[in-house]
Image: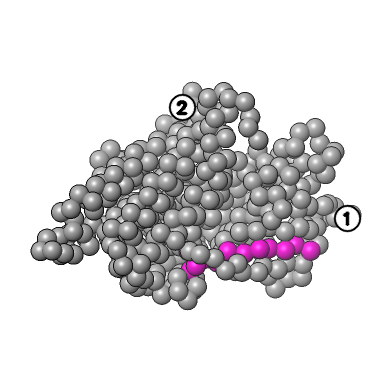
Amino acid sequence: METSGFSPEQLTVRDAILKICSNFSDDYWMEHDQTETYPHELHAALAKDGWIGIALPEELGGAGLGISEATMMLQSIAESGAGLAGAQSIHANVYATQPVAKFATPDQRGRFLTKIISGEWRTCFGVTEPNTGLETLKLTTTALPDPDGDGYTVTGQKIWISSAQVATKMVLLARTTPIEDVKKPSEGLSMFYVDFDLSQPGLEAKRIKKMGGRAVDANQVFFDNYRIPKDSLIGQEGQGFKIILHGMNAERCLLAGEALGLGYAALAKSTQYARERIVFGRPIGKNQAIQHPLAEAYMHLEAAKLATYHAARLYDRSSPGHPEYDSTITQHAVGIACNSAKYLAAEAGFRACERSVMSMGGMGYAAEYHVERYLRESFVPRIAPVSREMIMNFVGERALGLPRSY
């Protein structure tokens, strides 16, 4: 990857993260993928050096940096060969904690975030449901106030919850007012930061077998009258959707970075192979049929990289607490930039992985060369957390002023 134009802070992050990740070989990640074993060692190494709290406040023990630096961190993890699985092992701890840091009370921030930063706790993100999917405003998981007023009782289901088998906390979006009793569908949803203890009654997580990123578990989560305390509510009751959007735009930037990392990792493997593999007395990389698809993939990655870090910069500078705060940057602009970046990076990453496998022929299909693992993982940024088609719907309506199509 061309690193010209990045800030000194971003380059420092990149160098430090790649140094940590150099202790985890390609074979480590291949084995953890094949055995579906969580990469606890990477999480511990990143926590030890303070990287889990990269975008959390310094007064809590975080680094106080922005999503621009966090995106570089997650890209570098993926690019090191850890792939999406390595990045996803800390992914939610970075983006899902953003709305907590912004909207929680000072007391809540101190109690909820300090142990995330130290690595003692881990967070998962509970929004998606099996029967609502992208229709977030129609989610049906409820958090009903207890009669004694001391807390809430949660009932419902969530799906595709990463790291639920190892998490101790969950950022949860649940309905506190029935949808038929609110003026707007976006009202009546509340955000909670809850204890996630699978040994407690009323809480269960079932692991989902999946195609890629198998080192990090994905789950369906079941709540059955699960009790949570009153002070787990973040912000005002009924305003959870607005609050959680603060984390969703950050997640799009981070996932874009991870997709870029996958693509660059795949190109590093395939171009090395193309230089070394000799057929008919010459390296296959000398043939334009091999060289041109890889060169095109690289250019798409570089273009998507620019879109990704532009979006991250807008996200950071739209926050009043940022040293380069720009009041002219609207949330409308941030949303378009972050969604566009996720789309472009996901497509560029997939293209690079697919062309790397194809250029390596049979060896691209072999696990020992690792690019097949990158290709399997590259589908995730194209699907989650929002589909390509919904991003195009969003851009068509919000950026181009076209009628809503769904």
Q: Where does the magenta region start and end?
A: 213-224
Furthest toward the right, the residue is 147
Q: Position of residue 174 (x, y in %)?
A: 73, 50
Does 403 sit above or below residue 350?
above
Q: Position of residue 32 (x, y in %)?
A: 44, 73
Label 1 sits on what residue type?
Asp
Image quadrant occupied by the C terminus: top right
Image quadrant assignment for residue 65: top left
Magenta-colored stretch includes residue 218: yes
| Nearer-N-terminus badge (1/2) | 1
Helix, strand or loop for disc 2: loop
Disc 1/disc 2 C-alpha distance (Å): 45 Å
Q: Position of residue 56 (x, y in %)?
A: 50, 49
Q: Can residue 349 be seen in this view?
A: yes
* Residue 326: mark: 2
Q: Residue at x 76, y 33 (%)?
A: 184
Label 2 sits on what residue type?
Asp
Q: Is residue 228 left or right of residue 336?
A: right
Magenta-colored stretch includes residue 13: no
